[in-house]
């Protein structure tokens, strides 16, 4: 491109090239993005929000700490923290750095034993002569660095007057070793020698010592034995796939190609002899590459293998990557070797990470530095139901639900009995009566036989029961708590199903939580709560509780003494189960954080993220014990 053509595009970042002094047609990096960041264009069903506010600086990298805080490096030497969605006013760390060109504070990582030793590692450019890049370790003291805690882990080779191609990414691998991406300092020859650390990926112990199983340990000398792979131009970002040993290295190209390389010990990726695909057996060819007609510098990479799945399952195992001046995020499928568009309209993204919540975060240098969170719109409850044995007195079946939002929600409620015989239920309730109450116990509507009142509306909504003695109603409800009570006409008993349907899923109100209280027997008389989520593509965080003993304080004379809880999908596959809710520490912590910790240790709870679909929660009594139980399903999105 000509200088005139490129002026607008390059006004907010610097292009650098080892073979040219001008900024024309060169591999890319940055100085500062000062333009405002418009909203990105995302696939249908996804949304983005700014996360934490303006960083008031030029960010270079970010990393989630094991406790969920987001640490962000600013090129001028500060590490900022976003905690619980808010940018903390005091920097975690402020270093004196050389931030000219592409130098500065360029990477941050956390020790695998962070919860006990609180070690944080950073990669930065030392400002005093001789100028060089360094990896140091600091000790965290809460949200700041402990004074005087810097320990120099590794000093890299002295830099030339060239201020570009510094690399800077660092991550701990699944083997517990620290991996470091180092640029070749605008001298391609550095990348092909074992006599310095430039243009390489390094592997060291957390102490700074060098593992004896490094591939060049016996052929290199001194610190150069830390070399793990070579032949790289500027490996500014790389990533490990969680749960595996796989590593992808993003190498910023010169004038033609950007590369994603399979990180394999001892590999030579060919720079400066080759760029992009190669048939030379001496070099490892990239597993994916793209030309500069769509971008100029690959700058971020993240595998989608989060602890909590928030995106649709089709993204699982895929690799997100971005381009600095292309303004896009693409997603690479390692199985097919193909990449597809994901987001566009992004202003100079420099890093990507998948958060512990399953959302995708990207770091943008626009508007003084910003983090954006991309998430799939979470699915909402479309249908909730409870199946239980209906008795008399306290043994009636009660299904509670909550309507949230600012506009009334149109719902359909049914009480099904006789038609359950078609599904193998031998003791179905022959004539169910339905009553819909508000939280204060006042009646909203009631129905005995569904054809008596709203026959036309129920048929139009597709909710007409199969048996005339079954009950159903349609109501438009403002936000609040409601209970659907199913009893037997004239004191009848048997198994019944209470169902609540969202008849207006596109409104901004939603069915949030559902509960069913009923007697738990054995065999087919267990307590079952079914729910369906949908209308959107994202996973929804759900908490499910099975309560028994604590019901006694609410006047229930015969509560289930030890409830057990199981969750299955539409295929009957067990997704999760629980007996005593404190047994599984991670789940117990999540339940407690939601404010849903049961008051009795014998009660059960599950915290899980669910993709759109149909699910069934089942409550049984341990050792076939019986009694009244309450099952609750909470939407924690």
Image (tube, rainbow, N blue to C red):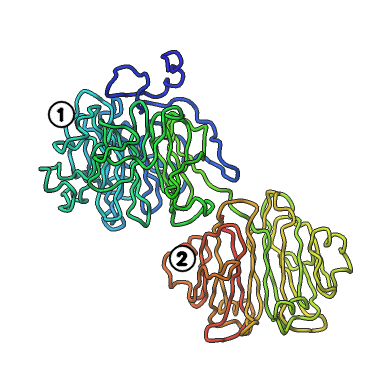
Q: Residue at x 27, y 56 (%)?
A: 175
Q: Which numbered tag is attached to residue 279?
A: none
**Quarter of the image where the N terminus is located:** top left
Vertical placement of residue 590 versus 76, above or below: below
Vertical placement of residue 489 versus 10, above or below: below
Q: Which residue is drawn at 24% across and 43% down?
A: 229
Name the quadrant containing residue 503: bottom right
Label 2 and label 1: CA atoms lie apart by 51 Å
Q: Which residue lies furthest to the top in this view?
A: 4
Q: Position of residue 212 (x, y in %)?
A: 15, 53
Q: Position of residue 458 (x, y in %)?
A: 83, 62
Q: Where is residue 68 in the image (x, y as percent from the top left)?
A: 40, 51
- Which of these two is toward me, 398 or 375? 375
Dot 1 falls on a residue whose secondary structure is loop
Which residue carries the number 2 mark?
587
Q: Which residue is drawn at 35% across and 49% down?
A: 240
Q: Position of residue 214 (x, y in %)?
A: 18, 50
Q: Which numbered tag is attached to residue 130?
A: 1
Q: Residue at x 29, y 51 (%)?
A: 173
């Amino acid at each position: 491109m000509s200088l005139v053509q490129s002026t607008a595009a390059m006004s907010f970042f610097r292009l650098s090239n080892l073979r040219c002094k001008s900024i024309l047609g060169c591999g890319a990096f940055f100085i500062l993005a000062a333009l405002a960041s418009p909203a990105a264009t995302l696939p249908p069903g996804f949304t983005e929000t700014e996360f934490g506010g303006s960083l008031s600086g030029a960010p270079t990298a970010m990393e989630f700490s094991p406790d969920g805080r987001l640490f962000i490096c600013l090129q001028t030497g500060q590490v900022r923290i976003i905690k619980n969605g808010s940018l903390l006013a005091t920097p975690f760390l402020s270093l004196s750095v050389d931030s000219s060109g592409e130098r500065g504070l360029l990477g941050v990582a956390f020790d695998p034993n962070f919860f006990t030793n609180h070690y944080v590692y950073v990669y930065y450019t030392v400002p005093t002569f001789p100028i060089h890049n360094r990896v140091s370790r600091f000790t965290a003291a809460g949200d700041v660095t402990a004074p005087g805690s810097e320990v120099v882990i590794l000093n890299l080779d002295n830099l030339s007057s060239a201020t570009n191609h510094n690399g800077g990414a660092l991550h701990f691998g699944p083997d517990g070793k620290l991996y470091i991406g180092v640029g070749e300092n605008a001298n391609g020859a550095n990348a092909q020698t074992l006599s310095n650390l430039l243009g390489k990926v390094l592997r060291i112990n957390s102490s700074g010592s060098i593992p004896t199983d490094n591939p060049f340990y016996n052929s290199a000398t001194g610190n150069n034995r830390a070399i793990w792979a070579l032949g790289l131009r500027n490996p500014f970002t790389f990533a490990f796939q969680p749960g595996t040993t796989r590593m992808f290295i993003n190498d910023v190209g010169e004038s033609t190609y950007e590369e994603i390389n399979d990180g394999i010990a001892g590999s030579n990726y060919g720079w400066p002899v080759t760029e992009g695909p190669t048939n030379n057996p001496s070099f490892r060819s990239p597993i994916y590459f793209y030309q500069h007609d769509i971008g100029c510098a690959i700058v971020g990479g993240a595998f989608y293998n989060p602890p909590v799945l928030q995106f649709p399952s089709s993204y699982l195992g895929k690799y997100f990557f971005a381009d600095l001046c292309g303004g896009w995020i693409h997603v690479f499928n390692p199985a097919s070797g193909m990449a597809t568009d994901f987001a566009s309209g992004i202003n100079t993204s420099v890093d990507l990470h998948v958060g512990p919540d399953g959302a995708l975060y990207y770091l943008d240098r626009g508007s003084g530095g910003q983090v954006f969170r991309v998430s799939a719109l979470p699915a909402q409850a479309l249908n909730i139901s409870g199946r239980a044995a209906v008795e008399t007195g306290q043994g009636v079946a009660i299904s509670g639900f909550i309507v949230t939002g600012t506009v009334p929600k149109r719902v359909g409620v049914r009480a099904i009995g006789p038609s359950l015989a078609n599904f193998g239920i031998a003791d179905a309730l022959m004539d169910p009566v339905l009553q819909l109450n508000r939280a204060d116990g006042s009646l909203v509507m009631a129905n005995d036989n569904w054809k008596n009142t709203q026959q036309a509306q129920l048929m139009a909504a597709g909710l007409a029961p199969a048996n005339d003695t079954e009950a159903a109603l349609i109501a438009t409800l403002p936000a609040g708590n409601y209970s659907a009570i199913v009893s037997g006409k004239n004191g009848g008993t048997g198994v019944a199903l209470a169902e609540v349907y969202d008849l207006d899923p596109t409104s901004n109100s939603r069915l949030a939580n559902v509960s069913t209280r009923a007697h738990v027997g054995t065999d087919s008389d267990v307590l079952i709560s079914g729910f369906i989520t949908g209308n959107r593509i994202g996973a929804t965080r759900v908490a499910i509780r099975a309560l028994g003993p604590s019901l006694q304080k609410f006047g229930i004379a015969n509560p289930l003494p030890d409830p057990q809880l199981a969750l299955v999908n539409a295929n009957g596959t067990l997704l999760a189960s629980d007996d005593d809710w404190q047994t599984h520490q991670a789940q117990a912590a999540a339940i407690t954080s939601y404010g849903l910790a049961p008051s009795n240790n014998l009660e059960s709870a599950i915290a899980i993220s669910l993709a759109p679909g149909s699910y069934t929660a089942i409550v049984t009594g341990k050792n076939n014990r019986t009694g009244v139980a309450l099952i609750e399903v909470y939407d924690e999105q």
